[in-house]
Amino acid sequence: MTPDAPESFTVRPVVTREPVTPITVELKPCFADETLDGMNLLNEIVDRYPQAISFAPGRPPDSLLDVRRHIATLPRFIAALARRSGTTAVREWRRLGQYSRTNGVIQEAIALHLRLDEGIDVSPEAIITTVGAQEAMAILLTGLFDPQTDILLASDPTYVGITGLARILDIHVVSVPADDAGLDPDAVERTLRSIRGKGRVRALYDIPDFNNPLGSSLSMDRRVGLLDVCRRHGLLLIEDNPYGMFCYDGNRLPTLKAMDRDGTVIYIGSFAKTLFPSLRVGYLVADQRVGNCESPLARALSRVKSLITVNTSALCQAIVANAIESGRGSLDGIVAPKRDLIRRNRDTLVATLDKSFADLRGAVHWTVPHGGFFLAADLPFDFGAAELRACAQTYGVIACPMRLFTLAGGSRLRQIRLSFSYLTPPEIETGVARLSRYVRDRLRR
Ligand SMILES: Cc1ncc(COP(=O)(O)O)c(C=O)c1O
């Protein structure tokens, strides 16, 4: 305050009043749902036992994020972009600081990456650049589903990003039980029959490649079968594929979107694993027609995105475009070292499980994933919140209960998900030794 400031500008001291009872806010009933609480529980345990070896996070390895290089090469990318578009670097940098087009500014680059790395041929117009894959799910659920009438089918167990969000939005989810080989088209057919007349089944959600949480990959027969069931019943098939480029054995099978001839598949992608998660850049491919319009569904959904996040950060999009351009359209050069490291981790985990549980093979078993970040293991007893806590506290190891990802239950309640993407091989070996001690103590009791 200057001495001659008018009185009206004087800052008045805060008046202390009598304490009042704060108002209480009632949450929507879904907040009591276990599926929404599960992830909080897991985070709480990870925070509470920082010394425990955690097989929980589905993160890419810290050592290969290379954030500094992505940022350091950005000025060269911007200068080249300015030259190509006949503007100036100053102007391009300013554009990175501004609001930008709702559906994104790098769809050409994403379309090229999709063609080269995923065998998917789509027009840039059919792509929305999103704030992570998570926003793609939010756009689809809010833009396509009427909670009064529409049902989402989801393979079970599945990624809680979609089922949890559906729960918050009051969208009815019906689970289709998957087996160790992933989603079976016959199971989809059976589920559709069992819910006939109960609502309009709008879409089926699945992660066909290197599934989270199962680690499974669909066979070619199942891919063909799924497309066929969805087509016959008029369902959209939402294919979520953040792990496709992390294939460790043999050749990759085509994505459902690459096999799609009539617009059955809506495809979700993410740069969180191929580049790095803090970018929060993903995308949605929606090339379906809307009524008689020529423009794709992605154009219509832009209205939804504009009301959720307005646009995806242009700065983060530029980092993605730079990465794609540095590989002449392909991210394979950037992904390859991560893929090699995580493949070695997968091999270490499987070899250590083989060794540590050799005498318990009848009671403890696991599937060997051909790609991705996760492996599912069966234990001879239920593994829930209490077991998670005991394991972390007494044995110093954290495994993710499969029940966090399932709406169904049954034998899944005895399963755990082990993530092998983030730990080092010595940590994996120590973690499995601790897990083995826990299982043996439990069995003795
Ligand atoms: C199957 C699946 N979909 C989507 C995501 C989220 O991707 P994003 O970080 O781009 O939102 C994950 C992340 O773990 C995932 O496992």
Image (cartoon, helix red, strand yellow):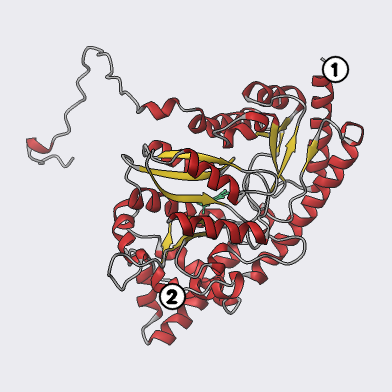
- On the image, the x and y values in percent for residue 166 come to 42, 41
- On the image, the x and y values in percent for residue 167 come to 42, 36
Residue at x 38%, y 53% (from the top left corner)? 139
Q: Amino acid at mark 2?
A: Ser
Residue at x 28%, y 59% (from the top left corner)? 303
- On the image, the x and y values in percent for residue 65 come to 63, 58
In the picture, the disc for residue 123 is 2
Residue found farthest to the top: 18
Residue at x 52%, y 78% (from the top left corner)? 76
Q: Residues within 10 Å of mark 1 (few under 14, many from 20)?
A: few
Left or right, residue 117 beside residue 441: left
Residue 13, compared with residue 193, is above or below; it is above
Looking at the rendering, in which quadrant would you find the C terminus?
top right
Mark 2 / mark 1, whichever is N-terminal: 2
- On the image, the x and y values in percent for residue 57 come to 63, 43
| Front residue of this view, candidates 422 and 150 | 150
Q: Residues within 10 Å of mark 2 (few under 14, many from 20)?
A: some
| Front residue of this view, candidates 80 and 100 | 100
Task: Give the spatial CA distance, label 2 vs label 1.
Answer: 60 Å
> Does dot 1 land on a helix, a strand or a loop?
helix
Q: Which residue corresponds to mark 1?
A: 444
Looking at the rendering, in which quadrant would you find the N terminus?
top left
Residue 267, compared with residue 190, is above or below; it is below
> Does dot 2 land on a helix, a strand or a loop?
loop
Please indicate, yes or no, whether residue 281 appears anywhere in the rendered image.
no
